[in-house]
Image (cartoon, rainbow, N blue to C red):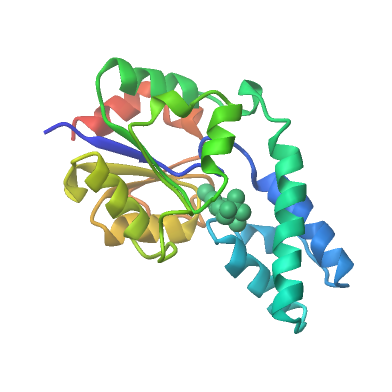
Amino acid sequence: NKKAIIFDLDGVIVDTAKFHFLAWQNLAKKLGIEFTTEDNEQLKGVSRVKSLEKILEWGNKEISEQEFEQLMHDKNEEYLSYVDQMTTSDILPKVKETLDYLKENNYPIALGSASKNARRILEHVDLLSYFDAIVDGNEVTKAKPNPEVFLKAAELLKAQPEHAIVFEDSLSGIEAANTAKMLSIGIGDENILKEANYVFKDFEDMGLAKFKEILNE
Ligand code: BG6
Ligand code: MG
């Protein structure tokens, strides 16, 4: 039975974590809260609202609902100013080759992301046309590690979860894929992603030969 492939976006297809970091760091600075790259690590896969809640919690800060909305808006504006400068050169190594292989061999492909900016980013890096289905932060109500995002993606691809393969860079995303009974492939640090069925540093490290093996399991 043919596998369906679901990709997370941020940290798997493109390295947008550095842009999120810059925008969150500026916001934290305005609030007098320290924000490090380690803190940013904990926000991977976490929604915009939840991320701000965490930063406020870390800084022991309470703000009005109105200020919260304003900060979310400002953060996203700054983030988008970086996103809008993205080009095809921002695609992570060997991602395009992997997508090309899948497309040429008629594998159904979906995006499963927490981001509300997913389509905009895919347009900038010219990858939108690869995806048969897109499930992003505008469509999900339950954030990863809840499997909703991946289950919806599989459903749109008309694939059973057992026949789906998920690429993820966040632990919450790996947990979501595992809960959905999908095959999980972690992209990143094996010490963080140890619950994944496979972990590779990046797509180059995985290699197409290994991926073909996994596809035929
Ligand atoms: C995830 C990122 O993919 O999307 C998180 O890993 C981000 O860092 C989340 O907060 C929401 O993204 P956006 O683009 O809707 O703010
Ligand atoms: Mg991610």
Q: Quadrant of residue 159?
A: top left
Up/down of 29 relative to 7, above or below: below
Q: Residue at x 76, y 40 (%)?
A: 81
Horizontally, is 92 left or right of 164 in the view? Answer: right
Horizontally, is 147 left or right of 81 in the view? Answer: left
Q: Nearer the viewer, residue 194 or 128?
A: 128
Q: Quadrant of residue 41?
A: bottom right
Q: Quadrant of residue 104?
A: top left
Q: Residue at x 48, y 22 (%)?
A: 96
The N terminus, quarter of image: top left
Residue 120 in the image, given as x and y percentages of width and height:
58, 37
Residue 160 in the image, given as x and y percentages of width and height:
16, 46
Residue 92 in view here: no
Up/down of 199 relative to 4, above or below: below
Residue 26 in the image, given as x and y percentages of width and height:
84, 58
Q: Nearer the viewer, residue 19 or 94?
A: 19
Residue at far top of view: 104
Up/down of 188 relative to 146, above or below: above
Q: Nearer the viewer, residue 86 or 173?
A: 86
Horizontally, is 159 left or right of 128 in the view? Answer: left
The C terminus, quarter of image: top left
Q: Residue at x 38, y 61 (%)?
A: 175
Q: Residue at x 45, y 61 (%)?
A: 172
